[in-house]
Image (tube, coloured by chain):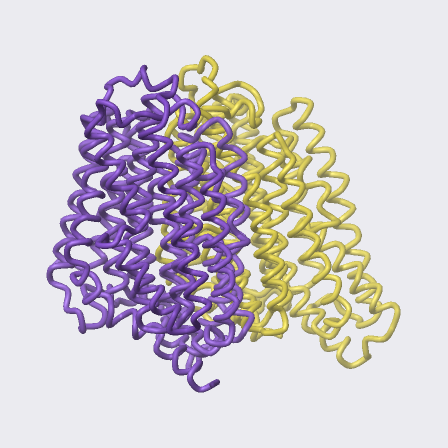
Chain colours: A purple, B yellow
């Protein structure tokens, strides 16, 4: 039987081989796509066989560095499974897009994407703090190289900002992990289970800072805009689609269960930051002059909303946040790929040069409209379902909180409608006439379509996801929830 | 009484060096290949003997001036490995055409001296061994005989001698106070006579300054960038890997075996030096354009992390120290081997400009340099990460020094800057590299060194268990000695 270890090892090994061997462009593309699809197939197998109440599954537990109490402990619960599944899909689509767009030295670019995928799987499956750190820090390197080598003109500055922010967070987290692991009663033990409830406030803040930067949460979002703007579209899709989810996932699956007392005590701060980011990101998204800007700020807003959902510390909030992360991964990855297609074809993503694209471009118009509608949470869409869950949780907490969060959702509708209208309708832009091919056909469509279809699938059967996630997400916040109850 | 079995590796190294010197004298240029073979064979023999002796109980021998414990064995194994890799790396170097055997002989004398330094348990042995390896290294630094190399050799000679002299001066003060050069007797004497005496404090401070010179800790680091930049690149790798290990073993032995009573004097100084070294070196590395010089500052910075482990001390700290040093050795050797390759490729020094897009032309070397730099920065799955993990871990575990680990973490973030500059240059798409010279002689041997170092870096990063065990055993023998 395939375990998570295989799922992590295969893309990692394939990525390293691709990095080293200068395969021809086509061969490299097909090989990496094959590996990504194989990973996706394995994950679909996991999803099918998953027992909703069965705890951690498909895992391994083996001795790694016994001298330091480090074990290779991996396994997927419902939340990890959801994130793993969406990661496999997004990375496969990103590689497909890269093939279509054509990258120079594509074997290295695709190899790095596969390595990123492996480290992301590791983050979502890790049950040991050391293993978790390896994944959390490890994914940074391939993403940075992808940004540094294949990025836009201003990539150098973007790279420096990414590393300054994210490395700062993770290295302080490393000190906290060391403290937790080495002060374990009965010798060093880095397993997450043994760390539950042992950490003090300082360790809590070190973890929280790392995750807040990765998510990103206000006011640690400075690295996001340059990184999302300068990356190539497929890397931006991975960054905003799934890499940022590592932060959100870690809040829910690592921070809250490990530090229930502190999570309950400081939940108000994260709720406030989440709410502020949700409203502020939405307002800025509304003001952006280009497609990528809108998507990037909407990413900040949506991830803030996710953090808000997590720190409401109730069952609907946690399930809704997980669901919302999956939805947002699909939406933002698809939108970034679409924006990338537009930029490549038209030569610019600036709204001033675009517009009126709906005329005689039925495929593009349909895809953009479906994605736009999903992003603004039209009732019946899966995003609506997840946002509804979080709103429900917010209203259960305090009516004014629910009201403010609803305001953010209205703002989200505003910026997405503006994006749809700026791209599809209004006066035809001066660059629109040059589009070759005029409509969204060919490979690019094939890469965006699966993401849109997944969204539609989740809209039709949201219970498929929530019933798998519920048990795990509720368990994650249970201890912290009890702490809040004890306070009142 | 002399325990011949315990000292046999040192005798082997000394005899090998002497034989190579004779070969150099009698066979002149024709001795080059033989010198290298003798050097490699000796390195293998010494490492083999050290491994065979690993399980032996610690022995104090030659009138208690020398101790052969697991720390000594680690130094013998590591120094032999560095010697072998340096010989291989230097093999194709054009400068060696008519003086290859002298080169090998000098390297072996340096290795012999280094092993004796790591085994010294008396200031007398320490000084003699220190001079043996230092003088060999002064000569090796100037071996290229161009302007930079000679300048490096001369600077190293002057500043290295100052360091040695300060150390000896301090040892003389301690002798005056305690009547002995032997570490254990000095410690006992200080314990008995009290430590308030000005003579004793002055002696301790002078010894500490001398040690700080040798490990290259800020503010006694000024020789490091100049010497590392000017010396022939394989020699730079040898110094950065092997000498660093031995210098820190010397520091740990002196502080914990001879001067534990003066802890109140040397601890604050060491803490200040550790912080200054980590932070200033990271900042200084950031602004360099010459890659060798940049790496030199990165290595000064790594001394700062090692100092944390020295300060923490005890079994945990010393285990972290030994593992960190050994884990950093293949990073340094490998990185300088890549730079040597680049220098032969372009015929000039390695700068950020000359490295532009070079990673595309030489994929293996480019990837290797990237991995080595990631190792310096302490990224997971490299040996450098486990080293840093142990060092920070020992600091956190001591509770008292957690803040040093935090300072270390923050300066690591600053240090990432230079890493990015090099990687950014290596894979700069906008620049096309210049015309490359065809693969020069010696490429094969340099690539071999790079691959071996790469394998060691990954092996120690992914499966560090055995290394941690050995470092732990050695740390126990060192911690038990005081």
Relative placement, left or right, of A214 versus A466 is right
Quadrant hosting residue A107:
top left
Residue A488 appears in the rendering? yes
Residue closer to the observer: A436 or B53: A436
x, y (%) of residue A176? 50, 66
On screen, residue B157 above or below B219: above
Tell me the residue at 54%/40% (across/down). Answer: A160
Residue A289 position within the rendered picture, expressed as x and y whole percent measured from the top left: 47, 32
Camera-side residue: B373 or A371? A371
B123 up-or-down from B22: above or below? below
Give the camera-side residue of A53 and B86.
A53
Q: Position of residue A335 (x, y in %)?
A: 32, 39
Count how many numbered circles sit on residues in the image: 0
Asked whether residue B72 is in view, the answer is no
Most extreme residue toward the right, as rendered? Answer: B198
**Relative side of B298 to A344, left or right:** right
In the rendered view of the protein, which quadrant contains the N terminus of chain A? bottom left
- Of all residues, the one furthest to the top in this rendering is B435
Instruction: List the single residue furthest toward the front.
Output: A426
Please give the name of the residue rendered at 45% of the width and 61% of the height, measured from the top-left corner. Answer: A404
Taking the image as shown, residue A129 lies to the left or right of residue B417, namely left
Q: Position of residue A16 (x, y in %)?
A: 30, 40
Kindly identify the residue that appears in the image at 40 percent across and 24 percent down: A348
- When the figure is inspected, residue B446 is found, relative to residue A186, above or below; the finding is above
């Amino acid at each position: 039987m395939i375990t998570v270890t295989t799922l992590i090892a295969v893309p990692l090994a394939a990525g390293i081989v691709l990095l080293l061997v200068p395969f021809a462009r086509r061969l490299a593309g097909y090989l990496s796509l094959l590996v990504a699809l194989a990973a996706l197939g394995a994950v679909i197998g996991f999803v099918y066989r998953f027992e909703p109440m069965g705890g951690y599954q498909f895992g391994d537990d083996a001795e790694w560095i016994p001298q330091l109490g480090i074990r290779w402990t991996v396994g997927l619960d419902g939340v990890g499974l959801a994130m793993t599944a969406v990661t496999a899909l997004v990375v496969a689509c990103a590689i497909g897009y890269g093939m279509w767009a054509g990258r120079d030295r594509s074997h290295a670019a695709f190899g790095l994407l596969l390595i990123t995928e492996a480290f992301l799987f590791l983050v979502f499956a890790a049950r040991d703090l050391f293993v978790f750190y390896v994944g959390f820090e490890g994914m940074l390197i391939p993403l940075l190289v992808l940004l540094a080598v294949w990025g836009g003109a201003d990539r150098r500055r973007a790279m420096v900002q990414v590393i300054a922010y994210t490395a700062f967070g993770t290295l302080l987290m490393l000190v906290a992990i060391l403290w937790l692991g080495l002060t374990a009663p009965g010798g060093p033990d880095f397993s997450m289970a043994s760390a539950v409830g042992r950490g003090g406030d300082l360790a809590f803040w070190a973890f929280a800072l790392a995750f807040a930067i990765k998510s990103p949460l206000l006011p640690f979002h400075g690295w996001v805009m340059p990184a999302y703007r300068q990356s190539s579209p497929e890397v931006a899709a991975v960054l905003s689609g799934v890499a940022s989810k590592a932060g959100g996932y870690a809040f829910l699956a690592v921070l809250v269960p490990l530090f229930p007392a502190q999570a309950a005590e400081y939940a108000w701060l994260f709720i406030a930051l989440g709410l502020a980011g949700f409203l502020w990101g939405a307002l800025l998204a509304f003001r952006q002059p280009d497609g990528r800007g809108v998507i990037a700020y909407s990413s900040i807003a949506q991830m803030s909303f996710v953090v808000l959902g997590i720190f409401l510390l109730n069952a609907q909030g946690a399930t809704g946040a997980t669901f919302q992360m999956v939805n947002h991964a699909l939406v933002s990855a698809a939108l970034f790929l679409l924006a990338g297609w537009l930029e490549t074809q038209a030569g610019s993503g600036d709204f001033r040069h675009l517009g009126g694209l709906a005329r005689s471009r039925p495929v593009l118009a349909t895809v953009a409209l479906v994605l736009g509608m999903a992003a603004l949470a039209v009732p019946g869409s899966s995003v609506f379902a997840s946002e509804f869950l979080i709103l429900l949780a917010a209203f259960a907490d305090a009516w004014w909180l629910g009201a403010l969060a609803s305001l953010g959702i209205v703002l989200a509708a505003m910026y997405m409608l503006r994006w749809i209208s700026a791209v599809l309708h209004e006066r035809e832009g001066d660059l629109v006439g040059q589009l070759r091919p005029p409509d969204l056909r060919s490979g690019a469509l094939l890469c965006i379509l699966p993401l849109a279809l997944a969204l539609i699938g989740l809209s039709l059967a949201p219970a498929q996801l929530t019933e798998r996630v519920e048990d795990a997400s509720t368990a994650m916040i249970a201890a912290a929830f009890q702490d809040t109850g004890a306070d009142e | 009484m002399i325990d011949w079995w315990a000292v046999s590796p040192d005798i082997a190294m000394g005899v090998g060096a002497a034989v190579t010197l004779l070969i150099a004298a009698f066979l002149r240029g024709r001795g080059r290949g033989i010198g290298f073979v003798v050097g490699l064979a000796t390195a293998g023999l010494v490492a083999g003997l050290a491994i065979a002796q690993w399980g032996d109980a610690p022995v104090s021998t030659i009138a208690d001036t020398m101790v052969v414990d697991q720390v000594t064995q680690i130094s013998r194994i590591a120094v032999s490995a560095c010697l072998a890799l340096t010989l291989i790396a230097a093999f194709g170097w054009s400068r060696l055409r008519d003086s290859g055997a002298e080169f090998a002989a000098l390297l072996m004398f340096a290795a012999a001296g280094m092993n004796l330094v790591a085994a010294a348990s008396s200031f007398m042995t320490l000084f003699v061994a220190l001079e043996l390896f230092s003088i060999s290294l002064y000569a090796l630094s100037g071996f290229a005989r161009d302007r930079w190399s000679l300048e490096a050799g001369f600077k190293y000679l002057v500043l290295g001698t100052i360091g040695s002299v300060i150390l000896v001066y301090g040892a003389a003060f301690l002798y005056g106070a305690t009547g002995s050069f032997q570490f254990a007797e000095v410690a006992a004497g200080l314990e008995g006579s009290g430590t308030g005496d000005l003579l004793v404090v002055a002696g301790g401070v002078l010894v500490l300054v001398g040690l700080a010179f040798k490990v290259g800790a800020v503010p006694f680091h000024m020789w490091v960038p100049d010497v590392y930049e000017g010396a022939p690149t394989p020699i730079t790798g040898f110094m950065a890997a092997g000498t660093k290990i031995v210098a820190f073993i010397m520091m740990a032995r002196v502080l914990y075996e001879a001067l534990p009573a003066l802890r109140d004097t040397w601890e604050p100084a060491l803490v200040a030096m550790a912080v200054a070294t980590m932070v200033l070196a990271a900042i200084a590395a950031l602004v360099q354009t010459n890659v060798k010089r940049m790496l030199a500052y990165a290595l000064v910075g790594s001394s700062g992390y090692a100092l944390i482990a020295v300060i923490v001390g005890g079994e945990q700290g010393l285990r972290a120290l030994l593992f960190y040093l050994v884990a950093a050795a293949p990073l340094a050797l490998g990185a300088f081997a890549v730079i040597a390759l680049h220098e032969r490729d372009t015929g000039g020094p390695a700068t950020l400009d000359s490295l532009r897009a070079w990673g595309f032309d030489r994929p293996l070397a480019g990837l290797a340099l990237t991995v080595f730099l990631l190792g310096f920065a302490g990224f997971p799955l490299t040996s450098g990460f486990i080293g840093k993990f142990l060092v920070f871990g020992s600091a956190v575990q001591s509770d008292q020094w957690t803040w040093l680990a935090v300072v270390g973490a923050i300066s690591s973030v600053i240090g990432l800057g230079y890493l990015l500059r090099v990687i950014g240059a290596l894979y700069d798409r906008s620049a096309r590299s210049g015309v490359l010279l065809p693969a020069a002689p010696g490429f094969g041997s340099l690539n071999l060194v790079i691959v071996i170092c790469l394998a060691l870096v990954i092996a120690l990063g992914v499966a560090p268990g055995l290394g941690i065990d050995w470092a732990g055993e050695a740390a126990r023998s060192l911690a038990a000695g005081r």
